Each structure stands twice: as structure tokens, then as C-alpha cells.
Amino acid sequence: MTRSSAQPDTAGVDSIEGALALLRERGGRVTSSRVLLLRALFDSRRHRTAEELGAEVQAKTPEVHISTIYRNLDDLERLGIVVHAHLGHGPATYHLAAGAHGHFVCEECGAMIEAPDEIFEGLSRSARSRFDFDINPHHFAVLGRCRGCQ
Amino acid sequence: MTRSSAQPDTAGVDSIEGALALLRERGGRVTSSRVLLLRALFDSRRHRTAEELGAEVQAKTPEVHISTIYRNLDDLERLGIVVHAHLGHGPATYHLAAGAHGHFVCEECGAMIEAPDEIFEGLSRSARSRFDFDINPHHFAVLGRCRGCQ
DNA sequence: GGAACTGTGCGACCAGGTCGCAACAGCGTC
DNA sequence: GACGCTGTTGCGACCTGGTCGCACAGTTCC
């Protein structure tokens, strides 16, 4: 797989087999570290950092290096299988692109609420009409205070 | 000035003198590095990184260390004089709390649009009514695509 | 089974900050 | 103006999160 351009026009691959097929189709190779990483990603839909995913992979195959995890996450993101989001200061978190959503994160306690896309529709319309700006509400969380911390 | 709690309940100090008075009131000292930093912040209202502000201070007084800049920015933020925002991957940017606003940042070209608070009102209401979550739209930018990059 | 090329482990490195420490400097008091 | 308390600073070491170059290993295709 060439590590350049290639648009994530394929968001929504929803099985390990689909992901591997897409990988192969784009000239990539099916390696054991990639299969393990995909398995970790599909096994639990939680948001996890590269370190956490690395630990899960290494639990089965300890010699997989963390830099391989980062490179594979990058590749999977370029294929539109995975997305990363920043939920505050600290490491990025990764999850499957199928089922991407926005995030509200409490500045105080770190609690995270997954926000359905439609909650951003009004903002999306205003940004488009006033600034011709097309928002992507998934990438960076919206910070604030949760009920308990207000 | 003690480096603990102290809420930023004073957002909106809008002169160097006001900032210094607040600093003193809270037990802090008026040092030359702080005066220089405040002067840099008030001189231009652009968003700047700690490195950039450091360079401006060091242009006048080269021995001010970058870690002092970070510490002073922290202190000023704790006093509610300054806020920082994350406009994408890369270093945080700082600007005066008086005149804080949201940001739209293009994922492609990095262009930044300052967004008036009222554009977030609908989202703010929905987040409050649906999740009891009180958003702060200033801290993290909303990413997306600008007109030219769509 | 071998050539061709992609992916991997490894260690070095980088950016953006943070921290501990000893020396220094504000500021209130005498 | 000197004194002393205590907040602040310069400095270097360190930390986290991530990237990169390299030589070798693994995958795929013929």
C-alpha cells in the first residue's frame, strides 16, 4: 500500500473481512499485526489510544512494536476504516469509522458523552451559510461541563 | 501567587494595568518577564503559541526562559486574563480572555475563522437540554473544510 | 520457488511541555 | 536603605505522544 494520498471515500467498512479486502484492493498486505489490530478494533467499539490498542495486540503477540501500531492506524485511517479523535489534552483516541460521532467532554472530570450527528445540524447549517465552512464535528471534542461538575 | 485553585471568575481584564492589579491582588508579583509577556499579549490580539510569545519577549530580554513563559501563561490563565485554544494538531495558541470566541479551522489548509459566540447558541441549548452538558465552544476548534478546500 | 516490493522491529529522534532546584528579586516592615 | 519572607526565574533534565530511517522479514505474484 502506498503511504500517500488515497481518499477515505470508503467510510463504513464494517467487518474485519471487509477491511482486509479493502486493504488488499489498495495494494496493501495482510500481515498478522494488521489482523490483530483490526481484531482489537472490532472486538470492542470503545475509544482507545494507540498505546491501549498496542497493549491489546501485544498481549497476543508481544513483538509487535508500538511504531507499527501507529503506522497501521495511519494506514487504516487513510483507507477510511478507522478515525481518530481528540477528546482533550492527552493522546488521540481511535475507533471504527463506521459509527463515527461527535463528543462532549467534561473539562473537569473527563467524562465523555457520545453526541449524535443531528445535534450538530444547526451549527453545520449556520457555518455553511455564514462562512461557507463545512464542519466535521467528529475530530475534536466539544469541551464543557457535565451535569455533575457545573 | 499560589499556583493552585483560584477560579477564572474575572474573565475580561482589558488592560495591562488591570492585569497587574489583579495579579498583585491575588498575591502575585509584578516581574519584568510578566510585564513583557502582557505587553506582547496586549500589543497584538492575534493568536500566538507560547514559542511565538517567548520569541517576542526574548527580542527585548533574551534571558527570559521559555519555561517561564509557559508558567506565566498558566498563571495568567488561572487569573482569567488569558485563554488557550487548540486549533488543530500542533501547539496551543494563547490570546486574551476578553474577546474569547470559537474557531473554525480548515483541516486541509489550516485557515482559521473566528466564530461569534451566537453561532453556537443552538448547539449549546441542545447539549444542555439533552445531556445537561454546558459547552465551552472556545477551547477546541471545530474542524472542517473552508470554501477553497471543499 | 524466487523476484519484487511492502511491512516490521528497533532505536534514535522530535515537538511541545513540565518539573526540581538553587539563586534571585518583589514587596512589606523596620 | 537593609532585612527577610516568599514568590519567581533560569537552567537543565525529563516526560509524553508520536515520527522516521534503516536493514531485515514477510507477502504476493508469476
Image (spheres, coloured by chain):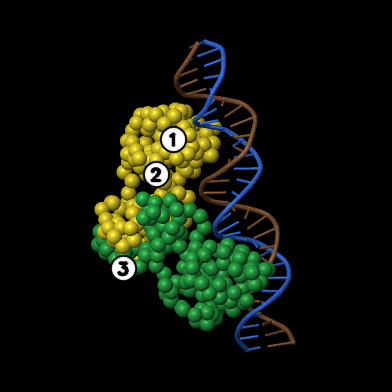
Chain colours: A green, B yellow, C brown, D blue
Q: Residues within 10 Å of mark 1 (few under 14, many from 20)?
A: many
Q: Tag 2, which secondary structure?
A: strand
Name the residue at 68% across, 68% down.
A63
Q: Is residue A106 above or below residue B7?
A: below
Q: Tag 1, which secondary structure?
A: helix
Q: Which mark is residue B37?
A: 1
Disc 1 vs disc 2: Cβ atoms closer than 8 Å?
no
Of all chains, the one bearing label 1 is B
Q: Nearer the viewer, residue B122 or B132?
A: B132
Q: Quadrant of residue A85?
A: bottom left
x and y percent of residue C23 in the render?
62, 26
Distance (Cα) linking label 2 and label 3: 30 Å
Q: Nearer the viewer, residue D22 or B12?
A: B12
Q: Which mark is residue B83?
A: 2
> Left or right of B41: which side holds D4?
right
Distance (Cα) linking label 1 and label 2: 14 Å
Name the residue at 34% across, 61% down.
B131
Q: Tag 3, which secondary structure?
A: helix
Of all chains, the one bearing label 2 is B
Circle 3 residue: A118
Quadrant, the N terminus of chain A: bottom right
Comparing marks 1 and 2, which lies closer to the viewer?
2
Name the residue at 27% across, 63% down.
A122
Whether residue A38 appears in this view of the structure is no
On whether disc 1 and disc 3 are found on a single subunit, the reply is no
x and y percent of residue A149 in the render?
39, 51
Q: In the rendered structure, which amino acid carries the disc numbered 1? A: Leu
x and y percent of residue A48 in the render?
52, 65
Q: Is residue D8 above or below residue C14?
A: above
Distance (Cα) linking label 1 and label 3: 42 Å
Q: In the rendered structure, which amino acid carries the disc numbered 2? A: Val
Name the residue at 59% across, 79% down.
A30
